[in-house]
Amino acid sequence: MEKKIGIVNRRAPHGTTHAREALDLSLALSAFNESLSLFFMGDGVYQLLAKHQADVILQKDFQPMLQMLELYDVEQIYVCQRSLSVRNISVEQLVIKTTLLSTDEINLHLAKQDQLMSF
């Protein structure tokens, strides 16, 4: 039986390596595990916004790699509706297809995971 692994993204896309490390891990794990779920909560929702200008702060733009998730068959991508609302972000502004969940629904999905990794 395959383990259900959840990767929780809570950090803004730049300023630390957390977002990039979570994405790298997600792509690597997708090759070995079909029960992979990604969660974007809190400031982590900023990772999904279009048109980051990472070069302005001398960072590498990893956002195009987000679109590779679909190629790697990572389909369970969840976004916290409250996190978007608080930050005045609409689903239409996100660069990849996601499933919008309430806080309670996110908690239910998190509880179903065998292992969680938070970035």
Image: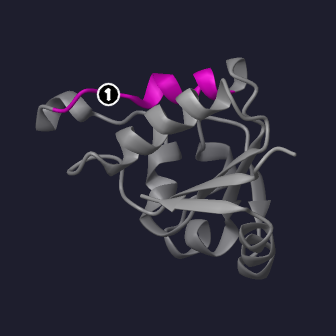
Q: Quadrant of residue 78?
A: bottom right
Residue at the disc numbered 1: 61
Residue 65, horizontal then vertical, whole percent: 49, 24
Rendered residue at 42%/58% (across/down):
119
Residue 50 in view: no
- Mark 1 lies on a secondary structure that is loop
Please give left or right for residue 62 compared with residue 49 in the image: left
Q: Is residue 85 above or below residue 26?
A: below
Of residue 51 and residue 99, the one placed in the foreground of this image is 99
Residue 54, horizontal then vertical, whole percent: 25, 33
Q: Is residue 99 above or below residue 68?
A: below
- Whether residue 65 appears in magenta in the rendering, the answer is yes
Please give left or right for residue 3 compared with residue 38 in the image: right
Q: Quadrant of residue 115?
A: bottom right
Q: Is residue 3 above or below residue 103?
A: above
Residue 62 in view: yes
> Residue farthest to the bottom?
104
Rendered residue at 81%/44% (across/down):
2
Rendered residue at 52%/44% (across/down):
48
> Residue farthest to the front?
1
User: Which range of residues does the magenta coloring cover?
Assistant: 59-69
Residue 56, horizontal then vertical, whole percent: 15, 33
